[in-house]
Amino acid sequence: MSSAPLICYCWTGQDSNGSPCQGKYLARSEQEVITYLKQRSIQITSIHSRKIGLVVKWKHRVTTKDIHLFTRQLATLLSSGVPLAESICLIRLHHQKAEMRSLLAEIQHTIIAGTPLSTALKRSSHFFDSLYISLVKSAEQHGQLAEVFAKLSQYMEQKEQLRQKMLKAMIYPIMVLLVAIIVCYIMLVLVIPQFADLFHSFGAKLPWLTQQVISLSNWLSHSSLYLLLVIILGAISFRISQAKWPRINYYLAKVALSLPILGRVLLRSELARFCSTTATSLRAGVPILTGLQMAMDSVSNRYLLSLFPDVITRISSGETLHQSLRRHPCFPETLIQLTMIGEESGKLEEMLFRVALIYEQDVTQRLETLEKLMEPVLILLLGLVIGGLVIAMYLPIFNLASILS
């Protein structure tokens, strides 16, 4: 996509009835505004530009949801018999986000100039990945644009649903732990020092737990800034180490897959995306080696990703897919068995879709179970931490008579 920033163009003109009118339009170029107003039969009198704020720019940015919506709308229009360029124009005219309108205007202009849609998508934006572009290119060769866009829309919807389930399962424990940390910090820095001054005024020996909590409170009160600085520097150092030594990501990914419960969920979610992507490309007529190369882009785990080049090399040397997968213990037996059945029956893409569905259902079930188990565990943890602080402060009060004596 063009690197030109969004600009707010203020214009004045006359409509088709000769009445004066004016307005604002967000676009990347003045020519885009002129084209937009001409389509509405508005004769421009004056036009000038001004910069927009970060909030407006963020509000009008392109997201993956916009690409998914565009794919679904384009599939509907093409299946209804509307020509490609006209379909993109209709979507652009009714879209609310300025950056997406600019993107679609650029694609439409490129198509009208005679460039294939796959090439126009590749030139226009990084939001269209290699799978998307390859499937569109294959559809252009076979004249099945409407069918392929419908399959792409279904694939993107399934991928987004799986991502939302994983995100939802992560948000709850993170929020609970964040609240626990904030509450504990407030108690240790603001509340407990008040109790400590009161206890010291009595001059009596305090219980061991109370002494430890007061010591932690004193340390945190004087070292909060240093602790925050250490955390920030540690995070920056970790990110630099990841960029400088990619092997760190490989080992972290391998450890993540070996975790007791979460590792199984991560592995099956990765394999579900891989199988769904491969099956979608095969169903669109893409060769298996090309489909596997494109499916690698859907895998985020570095350890798992490192296994696929060997799989692709062995397939190109004459091995079947299930034989290549069997050489790596990381791949489950269910995937290997169903892949073997699909290859022997000539219905590999159907079996891969079935594997993806099985793994998606397994991930959903396990995430629901984890959520149910995690809620009482987090509540218990929160109660132990905060309750422990409260008990530590009230222990001396329970022994108030002996302290006063």
Image: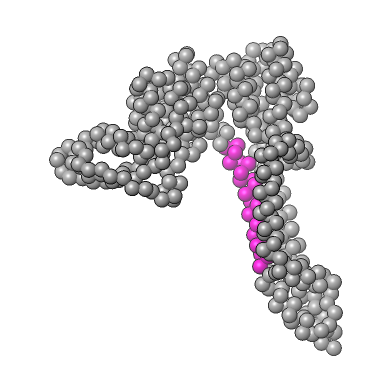
| Front residue of this view, candidates 116 and 243 | 243
Report whether 146 appears left or right of 212.
left
Q: How many marks?
A: 0
Q: Position of residue 311 (x, y in %)?
A: 71, 20
Question: Is residue 170 within the magenta segment?
Answer: yes
Residue stretch in magenta: 161-186
Instruction: State the residue at coordinates (69%, 48%).
Output: 237
Asked if 267 appears above or below 281 in the picture, the reply is: below
Report the side of 372 relative to 214 (left or right): left
Residue at the spot 67% in from the left edge and 17% down from the top edge: 342
- Compared to residue 190, the image places residue 161 above or below, namely above
Q: Position of residue 103 (x, y in %)?
A: 41, 33
Q: Can you tell which quarter of the image residue 196 is in?
A: bottom right
Give the quadrant of residue 222: bottom right
Tell me what residue is drawn at x 21 percent, y 35 percent: 41
Report if residue 86 is visible in the image.
yes
